[in-house]
Amino acid sequence: MSLVASLPGRPLTDGEIASLNRADSIELAVAVESDTDSEAAEANAADAGAEGLLVATDSWVKGIDFLEGVWEIVESIDIEDDEDRYDALRACEDAVRANRSDGSVDTE
């Protein structure tokens, strides 16, 4: 089962992110928060929880976004060391935020 397929069809709770961090196959999982609370509420029909996620292993980092009811990998970067991981985390975070602004719900 793929990482995205294993995620629920809603934003993740803090406890679910903590569970990802305890998984043997994942070294780091952190939420990517929206720039504003209203942006998150509009994008996800006011569901509470993390709608952006960074997941890292020893060999890759992925930026995953939940928008309009679907989780999607918006960036995936292979890494070789801790220095690469930092740069990859920043790039994936930027990709999640960019995807959110490109795909946000228009309220006009």
Image: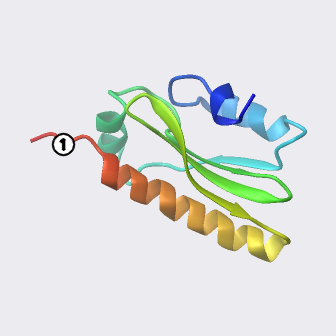
Q: Quadrant of residue 3?
A: top right
Q: Position of residue 11 (x, y in %)?
A: 51, 30
> In the image, what residue occupies the spot 64% across and 28% down?
5
Is 72 placed left or right of 85 in the picture?
A: left
Q: Nearer the viewer, residue 78 or 81?
A: 78
Is 6 placed left or right of 94 in the picture?
A: right
Q: Quadrant of residue 78?
A: bottom right
Name of the residue lying farthest toward the right: 24
Rendered position, 22 above or below 58: above
Q: Position of residue 87 (x, y in %)?
A: 67, 73
> In the image, what residue occupies the spot 45% across and 28% down?
48
Name of the residue lying farthest toward the top: 9
Q: Nearer the viewer, residue 78 or 26?
A: 78
Q: Position of residue 47 (x, y in %)?
A: 41, 26
Mark 1: which secondary structure? loop
> In the image, what residue occupies the spot 52% across and 35% down?
71
Rendered position, 60 above or below 84: above
Residue wearing tag 1 = 106
Q: Which quadrant is the C terminus positioned in?
A: top left
Name of the residue lying farthest toward the left: 108
Rendered position, 106 above or below 57: above
Name of the residue lying farthest toward the bottom: 83
Categorize mark 1 by other alpha carbons within 10 Å: few (<14), some (14-19), many (20+). few
Is 68 placed left or right of 79 in the picture?
A: left
Q: Quadrant of residue 80?
A: bottom right
Q: Which quadrant is the N terminus positioned in?
A: top right
Looking at the rendered structure, the number of numbered marks drawn on it comes to 1
Q: Amino acid at mark 1?
A: Asp
> In the image, what residue occupies the spot 82% across and 44% down?
26
Q: Position of residue 89 (x, y in %)?
A: 65, 63
